[in-house]
Image (tube, rainbow, N blue to C red):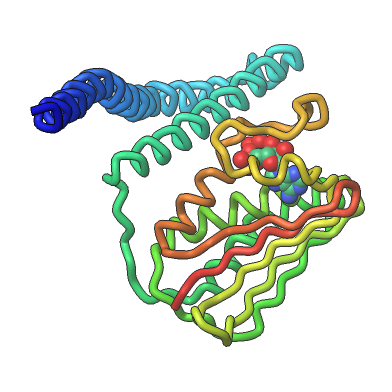
């Protein structure tokens, strides 16, 4: 009897603990899902009025009275920049909220990575030239893989834009593609810079959302700390991996491995 009573006690204890844990967890999951949906909806809803504002300001900028008034022209220019930043932020939040929900499917097809890479490098070149940074790329081979071309372009832009942002004038940024000949076979994308680098203690966190290394160091550099979390999501959605190697004051190298 004693044994049976003990077993009954254990079973009841397990049953009630499970009920209590389940009750405690339901509101957490519900609020997480609500939070994710709210972020996705809010970012989506913000994009239309922001785009309308941007095009209205574009029109205003062309007005003679604004063009001929340096103060008004500067105010209008600053407004445009802020709106552009807000559009970019809402785009990033939308991408991440969709990736959380699993609703962000990839449009996979065979694409030439070297073509996408070359196009992205050329789109970033004016930024690099304006900052006095040399931009090289080595894309000697044809790298055809199954991927979502738009997402891969976004990945190249995030890595190259960061490399240019965090490299002082006179520095170098390079992009190379190589085949990986060992298992798992694939393509290795390497973006290197001779910039400010990332301290070892921050390296594990740079792919986290809203993480920015030492706010005072990067205060002058625009950003919200979302680029690398999107880069990691794009890479993992392609079954790949992303890593950073960096020495403060010497530069950083981001390595992406995508399977074929
Ligand atoms: P951000 O919009 O702030 O650039 P990211 O998610 O792209 O956001 O990067 C996170 C942080 O990692 C940046 O704020 C910066 O501190 C650091 N970082 C990213 N790329 C580089 C780089 N190439 N060189 C130095 N620091 C970098």
Q: Nearer the viewer, residue 182 or 76?
A: 182
In the image, residue 234 sits, relative to residue 100, either above or below, namely below
Q: Nearer the viewer, residue 8 or 237?
A: 8
Question: Left or right of 104: which side holds 96?
Answer: right
Which residue is painted at 63% across and 75% down in the image?
177
Which residue is painted at 29% across and 46% down in the image?
102
Q: Quadrant of residue 73?
A: top right
User: How many numbered marks have been drawn onto this rendered protein structure?
Assistant: 0
Quarter, ligand 1: top right
Question: Left or right of 10: which side holds 141?
Answer: right
Q: Quadrant of residue 49?
A: top left
Q: Nearer the viewer, residue 17 or 75?
A: 17
Q: Quadrant of the C terminus?
A: bottom left
| Residue 90, position as x, y percentages in the image | 45, 30
Which residue is painted at 65% across and 42% down in the image?
206
Regarding residue 50, the answer to whether it shows in the image is yes
Name the residue at the front extreme. Answer: 1
Question: Left or right of 64: which side holds 185?
Answer: left
Q: Quadrant of the N terminus?
A: top left
Q: Quadrant of residue 44?
A: top left
In the image, residue 51 sits, relative to residue 227, either above or below, namely above
| Residue 208, position as x, y percentages in the image | 57, 39
| Residue 125, position as x, y percentages in the image | 71, 57
| Residue 8, position as x, y percentages in the image | 11, 28
Question: Left or right of 216: which side holds 5?
Answer: left
Regarding residue 127, the answer to whether it shows in the image is no
Which residue is painted at 23% across and 23% down in the image?
17
């Amino acid at each position: 009897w004693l044994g049976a009573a003990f077993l009954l006690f254990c079973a009841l204890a397990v049953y009630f603990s499970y009920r209590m844990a389940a009750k405690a967890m339901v509101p957490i999951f519900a609020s997480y899902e609500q939070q994710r949906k709210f972020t996705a909806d809010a970012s989506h809803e913000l994009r239309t009025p922001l785009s309308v504002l941007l095009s209205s300001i574009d029109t205003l900028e062309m007005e003679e009275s604004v063009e001929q008034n340096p103060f008004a022209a500067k105010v209008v220019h600053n407004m445009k920049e802020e709106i552009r930043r807000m559009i970019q932020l809402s785009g990033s939040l939308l991408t991440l909220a969709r990736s959380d929900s699993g609703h962000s499917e990839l449009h996979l097809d065979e694409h030439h990575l070297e073509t996408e890479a070359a196009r992205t490098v050329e789109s970033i070149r004016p930024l690099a030239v304006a900052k006095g940074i040399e931009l090289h790329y080595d894309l000697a081979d044809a790298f055809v893989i199954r991927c979502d071309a738009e997402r891969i372009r976004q990945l190249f832009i995030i890595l190259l834009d960061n490399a240019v942002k965090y490299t002082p004038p006179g520095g170098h940024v390079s992009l190379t593609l190589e085949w990986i000949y060992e298992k798992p076979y694939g393509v290795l994308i390497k973006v290197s810079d001779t910039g400010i680098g990332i301290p070892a203690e921050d390296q594990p966190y740079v792919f986290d959302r809203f993480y920015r290394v030492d706010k005072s160091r990067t205060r002058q550099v625009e950003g919200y700390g979302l680029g690398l979390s999107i880069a990691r999501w794009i890479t993992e959605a392609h079954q790949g991996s992303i890593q950073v190697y960096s020495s403060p004051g010497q530069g950083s190298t981001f390595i992406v491995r995508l399977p074929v």
